[in-house]
Amino acid sequence: MPDPIHFPNETQSNAVRETIGRKEPVALRTFTPSQAVLAKSAGSFHWTSEGRRLYDYSSGVLVANLGHNPRRWMQRFADYLGWQPDHLAGDGEGDYFEAVTLTAYNAITEIEARAVERLLGSIQASPGGSRLDTVMWAASGSEAVQKALWACLHADRNREMIIATRHGFHGKKGLAGAVTGSEDDPDRDPRVRFISFPREEIDDAAKYGQEIDLSRYEAELELLYSELGTRINCLITEPYLGGGGSYHPPNSYMQLLERFCRERDILLILDEVQSNFGRTGKMYAFEKYGVEPDFVCLGKGLGNGVPVSATVGRGDIIASLKYGEASDTWSANPLACAAVLATLDEFESTDVLANGERLSTIFFEGLERLKETGLITKVRGEGMVFGIECADAGEMPAGDVANAIVEACYLGEDRSDGIHLLGPLAERVLRVSPPMTMTESEARESLELLYKIIQKLAATLT
Ligand SMILES: Cc1ncc(COP(=O)(O)O)c(C=O)c1O
């Protein structure tokens, strides 16, 4: 195992890094050179064990859309679970208090029924959500993807083939792993075939809004259909390539996929694990792209930090799964349902989407400005999720530049405020996805800080 990352003058953080680094496998995390130790968080900020403040440019990994530990969300979450302040204060009346159970395997709860009704209400009220009438809960994004694919494959066992879009990310486990990446993997599940997702034509915000030539993508789809015909069961894609490097296609590409599916009775699964709950500007990305999927996979922001995911889709297809075929310990647990309810409450009663829209303009401008430093060459994004692509700096390859930026942002200017970034995607792309509740002044201040840090780094590298 590599030696744990250490930074000078971070005694407490280094002790935590030592424990984790020696007693957990590095495989549990993607490499991030800062290995930040987060002691506490509020809103758009984390604080390290040494008390240094970091602007959070990741929201976990697009999870805390509403910011960290939002007071009103937390109050609602506690209320849904029946937790009262005096429960924990302890009034000497026994070791237990009456509240909603935390676990209800093979039973059902009132809170689950409320969460199902509310989630379906939200989805079906959104343009494009009319086919989505049944909720299949899960605990992680990859499980939601796996369950959607199970349902489709069970519904018609004569149609065993799945189409996925190349360089997508749907998770690492089971069928979710099988539809991730590309055919380059020699152990690829033979049921999965890949088609291209636009990248070169839309590799910078300057190219957005230009129509792209779809004929190449049409031809690929036709070729696959001529080979596989009615063996094709379903097509799964992300609204935008997230883990694959932040590529946001024009609506016409998504609409092409939808048309191809509709005309051939192929099920369309949209993996919104990363984009749901406002990230692309709308509550659900299918609204933004003007398509009507048969299934959406939800996760991450769905619970604002409590692990919960769901596949929401066509009940007639999901009904092919018999008792127990999609069950597990954590699906539909009351804690998760309370989190979904509290998150829906916030989205439905505040201006978080409008705030995200305002922030989006500020971030596009601030990130574009980074090109002046010479270390950033391309900026991509929509709503409140961006990818900034790093350039080579002299002898240093772009991937190393990206890691150097992550580290410099963590250390901040003169070791005061820093910025928490995820390690690079697709080797050279840095994800920027702060909470959508960030204030405009926090956005401007943090972008100014980012500019200064990258400019200073550029001076040392070039
Ligand atoms: C689009 C998409 N689908 C699925 C997943 C997998 O989610 P999880 O890591 O919760 O299994 C991710 C995670 O990043 C994702 O971005």
Image: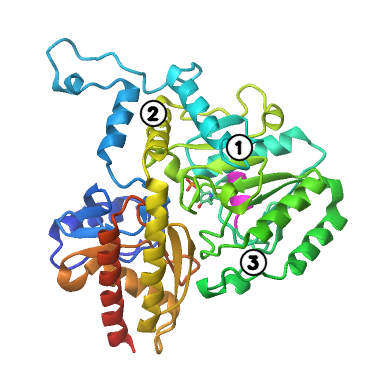
Query: Does 151 appear above or below 358?
Result: above
Q: Which residue is label 1 attached to?
A: 147
Cα–Cα span, label 3 and label 2: 38 Å
Q: Which residue is label 2 attached to?
A: 338
Q: Mark 3 or mark 1: which is in front? A: 3
Count of labels in the image: 3
| Image location of residue 277, percent across then percent down | 46, 45
Mark 2 is on which residue type? Answer: Ala
Are the residues tagged 2 and 1 within 8 Å (C-beta)? no
Magenta segment, prevailing SS (helix, strand or loop): helix
**Can residue 238 be spotted in the picture?**
no
What residue sits 37% from the left and 33% below the top? 342
Cα–Cα span, label 3 and label 1: 27 Å
Residue 113 falls within the magenta-colored stretch: no
Sequence-wise, which precedes: disc 3 or disc 2? 3
Q: Is residue 453 left or right of residue 247?
A: left
**Can residue 427 be spotted in the picture?**
yes
Query: Does 118 appear above or below 105?
Result: below
User: Label 3: few (<14), some or many (≥20) within 10 Å?
Assistant: many
User: Label 2: few (<14), some or many (≥20) within 10 Å?
Assistant: many
Mark 1 is on which residue type? Answer: Lys
Span highlighted in magenta in the image: 174-180
- In the picture, residue 218 is in which quadrant? bottom right
What residue sits 28% from the left and 35% below the top? 72
Q: Which mark is residue 23?
A: none
What residue sits 42% from the left and 67% below the top? 364
- In the picture, residue 434 is in which quadrant? bottom left
Sequence-wise, which precedes: disc 2 or disc 1? 1
Q: Which residue is label 3 attached to?
A: 198
| Image location of residue 128, percent across then percent down | 63, 42
Q: Mark 2 or mark 1: which is in front? A: 2
